[in-house]
Amino acid sequence: MGIAGLWIDGLEATSKTWPSELTLAASASSAFEPRALVLTKTIALPGVKGRLDHLALDAKGNRLFVSALGNDTLEVVDIAAGKPLASIRGLHGPAGVLHLTERNQIAVASAGALELFDGASYERLASVGSLDDIDNLRFDPETKRIYAGYAAGALAIIDAMTMQELGSIALAAHPEAFQLEPHGGRIFVNVTRAMQIAVVDRLKQEVIATWRMEKCRAQFPMALDESDQRLFVGCREPARLVVFDITLGKPVSDLEICGDADDVFYDASRKRLYISCGEGFIDVIDRRDANTYELRERIPTRVGARTSLFSAERDELFLAVPTRGKAEAEIRIFQPEG
């Protein structure tokens, strides 16, 4: 329901001056359209201070893994019970995190290394070092390989079975978010400081194309709609979502979004995007056709709550909400509707 769908979250609601294009979208929408996301559960994270980074999910085990970057811990949350389950300490600025389902293991990017933990005992099993500024992680289930963004510009390739580094792919600058084609051989990488999207051939292990970011800079989050061959890139300067046609390597659409975007996910069943922003909002974007997208709803959260995770398997969106003032850190769980 466009901006008409704005709902107020108690004391955390913030004032906003809406740009004209969003105001027009709001006036044209129905006031009776259901909310796109409904808050179903809030799980407190007592004593967890500072910035919260990436999330990972153990869907079968009902566990959420939260990289508490500012707390130097990995928090394990029992989703069903709605409470913290464990805290893995001894980390340094944990960022990217993966749950490796087959072996019930947890991989965490921490202080220049990829750390591997047992998913039952939470004991450290292995470490791959010499990965300066390691951040985002992705897993290829077909090859059992972990891809890790690190250093001044590279993707490390790591065998998830042996935790041996197999090589690296050079990039023009440090990589931020990146996406693997599930049924193709490419990786799309936000190379933010170089103001480009790098297209990597996984077999050749090299960059085969670069797409220049012409209008928007500081692009961090990224999502992929492989069925429609569309790549979604969230920018901060200015705050816009840019849609690329990955067959042409060119942008086909862009629209304004909330500020300080750090995660974006595509809900294929509803043809919808969820964007979490540090400005203190979640933007819900509806796809009208492959080249047309519009803001459906802007949901107030908390300033700094910019990392999230959408699970199609569970049909839930998890939002990491850091401490602010006297309000403690928490995980908010939303159910998509409409």
Image (cartoon, rainbow, N blue to C red):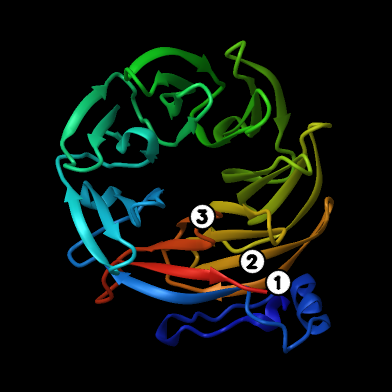
Residue type at numbered disc 2: Val
Q: Taking 238 as reference, is 296 above or below it?
A: below
Mark 2 lies on a secondary structure that is strand
Give the mark, 3 or 2, whose residue is nearer the N terminus.
2
The x and y percentages for residue 260 are 52, 57
**Mark 3 / mark 1, whichever is N-terminal:** 1
Say which mark, if any, is on residue 216. Answer: none
Picture coordinates of residue 122 (x, y %)?
Answer: 18, 41
Label 3 is placed on what type of residue? Ser
Residue 77 in which image quadrant: bottom left
Where, quadrant-wise, is the N terminus in this rendering? Answer: bottom right
Can you tell which mark lies on residue 311? 3
Above or below — where is 24 with respect to 241? below
| Residue type at tag 1 | Arg
Residues at discs 2 and 1 in contact (Cβ within 8 Å): yes
Gap between marks 3 and 2 measured at Cα: 15 Å
**Residue found at x 24% / y 76%:** 326
Q: Secondary structure at mark 3?
A: strand
Secondary structure, mark 1, is strand
Few, some or many residues within 10 Å of mark 3 (<14, 14–19, 20+): some
Say which residue label 1 marks: 296
**Which is more toward the observer, 157 or 306?**
157
Quarter of the image for residue 157 reads top left
Q: Find residue 319 and report its horizontal and vertical position in percent.
A: 44, 62
Residue found 50% across the figure and 65% down from its top: 279
Q: Residues within 10 Å of mark 1 (few under 14, many from 20)?
A: many
Relative depth, front residue between 182 and 235: 182
**Residue under label 2:** 284
